[in-house]
Image (cartoon, rainbow, N blue to C red):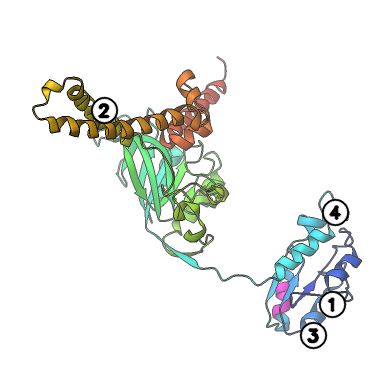
Amino acid sequence: MQFNGKTVCVCDCEGSMPLAAGQIAKACDGAATDVATHLCRAQLGRFEETLKAIDGDVVVACTQEAPLFLETAEDLGFEGELTFTNIREKAGWSSEGDKATPKALALLAEATLPRPITGTVELESGVSVLVIGGDDKAWEAAETLAATLTVTLLLKPDEEFTPPTVSQFPVFSGTARSAAGHLGAFSVTLADVAAYTPSSRQSLEFEPASDGGEFEFDLILDLSGGAPLVTSPEKRDGYFNPEPGNPAAVMTALFELAGLTGTFEKPQYVAYDPDICAHARSGIVGCTKCIDACPAGAISSAGEKVDYDANIWFWVAMLGGAALSVTGILLDFPSLAQDPDWLRIAQIIHASAAVIVIAPALGHIYVGTVGIEGSLESMTTGYVDENWAIEHHDLWAEQVMNEQSGEAGEEKAAEAQPAE
């Protein structure tokens, strides 16, 4: 059967998908359709005959047996493009599989559409890796990686470790608050960072902790066992957070980390058109669909939005209030003015300052009460919900959530201690 100029091979997977032949024929402009039943085994010859008979591209409605079909096409010297689409799990095997033929046809039509040419992005990844952990497993992992990478080891505070006989890499005590970025360009926010002292004897000792800050690394191995430092860690190349108690997962992460140095090409998944984006075109928040849809958090606002700056209001109130006060005194006590022209100037300045100060003051009051949902409650109760905190004070919200997740982990650990 033909869709958009491409030949489509459809199989009902041994009759497990009830495909309506009439609807399929109608979609193919009334042409005769022949749905296979066992295309990957008993009817493989039919697939071979199809490849021999045509010169164009072919779409097979099966992804499970794609390797078999690709091998068959290669053996036959097929020169067209062979692609695949899944109508079984996405349509035919659904809870409403007997009514899923239209959806299966839509999937077939989509698979035959011309694919847009996507660009690629080059990522440069060096050899610096941050290893985070709270026990000897992190130290062992750091020693393994030190053979090929430049390692920095961050240990949990208040944990005891035996001092190394040979210092192979920098060792610090501290807390990883968050991480952002991508392969080759991770920015990690660390707090309470302290370097270990070379004179440590029985157990590892550390210097007084500093405030920390943001540090750059190409790769991250997170063996802390806590919540991931990034959103959708499984989609973030270069960030690994295997379960510390799973040796196989840790070894897999070590093996993959060793190969993530050099230059890599990744597909460019996002095409940004500033002309249709309210953020860039008008400087307002139109929608956040692109930000919400990105599981890796790779899309973020660049700040081109309407947001009230408390610092601006501070200076407007301070300078405007001072102008109102000085000119008001002159108008109340005209004898202080040595020249009548001063009074006329004072009237102009007083009226202008009143407009400049009072208008933003009313706007500020509106925004702080009913203009932004949740603002009034935050002032009267002292509490805000999580979404309000993230939108208006993201750094503070992130710090509080990290502290709460840490406390929750400590409570679980305490509950897991056996009774004596």
Q: Hey, what amino acid is under mark 2?
A: Gly
CA–CA distance in space, label 1 to label 4: 26 Å
Q: CA distance from mark 1 to mark 3?
A: 11 Å
Q: Residue at x 46, y 56 (%)?
A: 281
Dot 3 lies on which element?
helix
| Residue 86, percent from left and from top | 74, 61
User: Is 198 placed left or right of 39 in the picture?
Assistant: left
Amino acid type assigned to the residue bearing label 3 in the image: Ala
Q: Nearer the viewer, mark 1 or mark 2?
A: 2
Of the two numbered discs 1 and 2 on the same chain, state the one appearing first in sequence. Answer: 1
Q: Which residue is mark 3?
A: 53
Ranked by sequence position, the earlier of labels 1 and 3 is 1
Indicate which label's residue lies in the foreground, 1 or 3: 3
Question: For the residue carrying disc 2, how many other residues have a C-alpha within 10 Å: few (<14), some (14-19), or many (20+)?
Answer: some
Question: Spatial distance from mark 3 to mark 4, Cα to Cα?
Answer: 32 Å
Residue located beneath label 1 in the image: 46
The quadrant where residue 16 appears: bottom right
What is the magenta range?
69-74
What mark, if any, has residue 170 been given in the picture? none
Give above or below for 417 relative to 173: above
Name the residue carrying label 2. Answer: 321
Residue hosting label 4: 97
Q: Residue furthest top?
A: 420
Cα gap from disc 4 to disc 2, whole angstroms: 71 Å
Q: Are marks 3 and 2 in contact (CB under 8 Å)?
A: no
